[in-house]
Image (cartoon, rainbow, N blue to C red):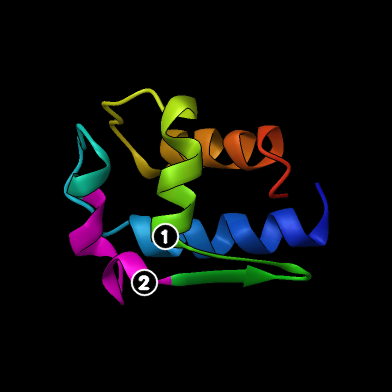
Amino acid sequence: MSDTEAELRSQLTEAFEGADYPVSNQMDLVPALPSGPGTRFEAGDTSFTAMEMAAKLGSHQEFPYDDVESLVDDVIEGLKAEDML
């Protein structure tokens, strides 16, 4: 795992761990984000907002999620598939 991936995984986990699980769609995650959809995730040369991430990763997520770990795993895999990481 690269430093960038590890940093993003940490930021995503911190941002989404406060969601009310299980979450059944992306909108269930918005209240957990410190700055709502404008919450920015940055590591190394990688930077995107929650809204940008949601727009690109919708097809890579399989809701519902019962815990933050499985959600973040799918987000990281989606970022890799979309060449965002």
Q: Quick one: SS at disc 2?
A: helix
Question: Tag 2: Cα neighbours inside 10 Å, few (<14), some, or many (≥20)?
Answer: some
Q: Relative to 53, is 79 on the left or the right?
A: right
What residue is drawn where x is 54% and y is 36%? 73
Q: Quadrant of residue 71?
A: top left
Q: Position of residue 36 (x, y in %)?
A: 27, 69
Q: Quick one: SS at disc 1?
A: helix
Q: Position of residue 1 (x, y in %)?
A: 80, 46
Residue 38: mark in rendering: 2
Q: Main secondary structure of the magenta part?
A: helix
Sequence-wise, which precedes: disc 1 or disc 2?
2
Q: Quadrant of residue 16?
A: bottom left
Q: Which residues, given as a range, are shown in magenta?
A: 29-39
Q: Is residue 36 magenta?
A: yes
What residue is drawn where x is 18% and y is 62%? 31
For disc 1, the marked residue is: 50
Amino acid type of the residue tagged 2 in the rendering: Gly
Amino acid type of the residue tagged 1 in the rendering: Ala
Inter-mark Cα distance, 1 to 2: 6 Å
Q: Position of residue 64 (x, y in %)?
A: 26, 26
Q: Position of residue 82 (x, y in %)?
A: 66, 37
Question: Tag 1: Cα neighbours inside 10 Å, few (<14), some, or many (≥20)?
Answer: many
Mark 1 touches mark 2? (CB < 8 Å): yes
